[in-house]
Amino acid sequence: MKQVQTRRFLLGGVSVMAIVAALSGCAAAIVGGAVAGGMVATDRRTAAAQLEDENIELRAVNNLSATFGERAHLNVTSYNAVVLLTGEVPTDQDKLLAEQIVSRVANVRSIVNDLAVMPNTTMTQRSSDSLITGQVKASMVDTTDLFANSFKVVTERGVVYLMGRVTQREADRATEIARSVSGVKRVVRVLEIVSEAELQKAPPPAPAPAASSAAPKT
């Protein structure tokens, strides 16, 4: 199995507020590209990296679906070949199996496995998560000291995940913004932290790619 490493990335949780929801029903899904488009802007990844992330998500989704079918709810999000797994699986063994499956996808550099061992979330919860994601991204767009499209935003059960290649200042500012959104329980940062100097030396950002053909988050 490909070695899973995350030492170049900052993975941390910031507690915010708890929410109480009475939910019923259950549905399973395996989806890729949990952060759908909407912002026409630039991206700090190269065009080739953006395309490879789309391919990684699609291949991972196909492989996971072949194994889990309807019995799990799995979201796959890739940024610069770092894959974030979120959602729900029935057992600890399934959580490990999902990571092993994704680790065998070509060009995956590392995996952050934040799958929860619990019943699948309801459609009500997933709709709430989608709303939170939209509100976080809209708040980033509204600010004047942050490039919103430097981040991917994923929300699962009220937990907001931030992905991207950013400076410490940008990471802290984005965390502050996400924390201010109603319904957010925690902010988890899966970020590649670079210095201002490194950012200045980076090649010009590539245009955002066309919308992914991966299934939307459900």
Image: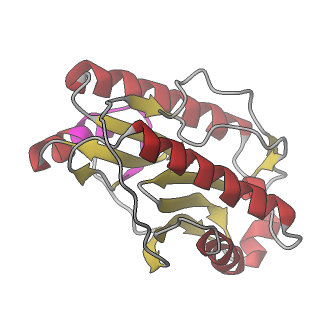
Q: Is residue 210 above or below residue 203?
A: above
Considering depth in this image, is 73 or 184 the residue closer to the camera?
Answer: 184
Quadrant placement of the N terminus: top left
Q: Number of callouts in the render? A: 0
Relative placement, left or right, of 209 versus 133 is right
- State the image quarter where residue 144 is shown: bottom right
Q: Position of residue 137 (x, y in %)?
A: 71, 55
* Residue 202 in view: no
Identify the residue at the far right of this view.
Answer: 144
Question: Magenta residues, as a range?
Answer: 98-112
Instruction: State which quadrant residue 11 falls in.
Output: bottom left
Residue at (76, 77) in percent of width and height: 196
Q: Position of residue 147 (x, y in %)?
A: 80, 62
Give x and y (percent) for residue 132.
Answer: 59, 55
Q: Which is nearer the eye, 107 or 132? A: 132
- Which residue occupies the foreground of this view, 59 or 40? 40
* Residue at the image point whose x is 31% and y is 30% from the top: 28
Residue 114 found in image quarter? bottom left
**Residue at (57%, 58%) from the top-left corner?**
163
Position of 66 with respect to 86 (left or right) is left
Q: How is the image coloured?
A: secondary structure
Residue 34, visible in the rendered structure: yes
For residue 143, side relative to residue 131 (left or right): right
Give the image location of residue 135, x and y in percent. 69, 56
